[in-house]
Amino acid sequence: MPLPICYLNGDYLPLTEARVSPLDRAFLFGDAVYEVLPVYASRPFRLREHLERLNRSLAGIRMSAPLSHAEWAQLCQQLIVRNSAREAYLYIQVTRGAELGRNHAWPENLRPTLFAYATALEPLSPTVLEQGVCAVTAADTRWSRRDIKSTALLANILLKKLSADAGAFETILLENGDLTEGSSTTVHVVKGGVIRTPPNGHHILPGTTRDVVTELAARLTLPCESGRITETALKDADEIWLAFATRGVLPVTSLDGAPVGTGKPGPLFKRMSTAFADYTRELAGIPAL
Ligand SMILES: Cc1ncc(COP(=O)(O)O)c(C=O)c1O
């Protein structure tokens, strides 16, 4: 459930009262970028990394950063305090703004629209951690700049709906016989004790949780590599994990109706999941930036 107070263009107000112009380019063209970041113990997690990715997305659509990191941090803090948020996630969006009219090529003098709100993070059902989630595969039908975290998510939502229709949690995407990522997650594959994930580039979003997994694997002295993963390797995995900001890491135990490994969350997943939870607790009280 969204929490009641949001931020819109400099004001904090009830989310139910927030209004933007129908001529906003986000509404007309999906001309906007966004971030989603978790809050653990009232502290934004990996704030710097999310803001750096936001600025890279903005640069990717030829916009400059509307706020400094310190100003974003202050805004996030306000949303947390005004909503008494403890375990939550924040959504922040920057659109190119509105003009009186509709032109594909935008004028240069637009004032960006800034919007942010918080949602309570409900505890994960224990069955998900005990039994894992199901995924299906599909061809990756998205554009060629998936590293830009754009709100133009039509392909992603159509792909996600395929898994929902199949009673599964995620659609894992394949392109030219290789794994790219999930419709809203980074995918890791474990085989023979080695964790692998596709390399960053224009073809996937550089996941913030992916980097946490890499760091925690080093702590746990588990081999973790970035490299090409074929469809055959995906289907032959001992373990498959989904990594994403709102849930950390989740185990996939069924892919296209077939069990992954033993069909239960694997031993490396359990170690990674525990390390993840420990890490978020360690950070409590440490400044977010
Ligand atoms: C397409 C896509 N890939 C990967 C991710 C994971 O990124 P992060 O770990 O920063 O949430 C997301 C998150 O929403 C996503 O939408």
Image (cartoon, helix red, strand yellow):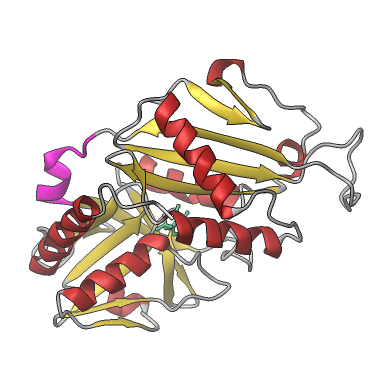
Where is residue 195 drawn, in percent x and y? 24, 77
Q: Residue at x 77, y 27 (%)?
A: 21
Where is residue 152 drawn, in percent x and y? 64, 49
Q: Residue at x 40, y 83 (%)?
A: 228
Task: Decide if residue 263 is on the left or right side of residue 276.
Answer: left
Asked if residue 41 lies in the magenta stretch, the reply is no
Quarter holding the N terminus? top left
- Please say whether residue 119 is visible from this viewpoint: yes
- Where 69 falls versus 17 (above or below)? below
Quarter holding the C terminus? bottom left
Secondary structure, magenta segment, majority class: helix
Q: Which residues are magenta?
A: 123-132
Task: Decide if residue 83 is on the left or right side of residue 268.
Answer: right
The residue lying toward the viewer, choosing from 142 and 289, is 289
- Please say whether residue 236 is visible from this viewpoint: no
Q: Quadrant of ligand 1?
A: bottom left
Asked if residue 124 lies in the magenta stretch, the reply is yes
Where is residue 80 drawn, in percent x and y? 41, 33
Q: Residue at x 48, y 56 (%)?
A: 50
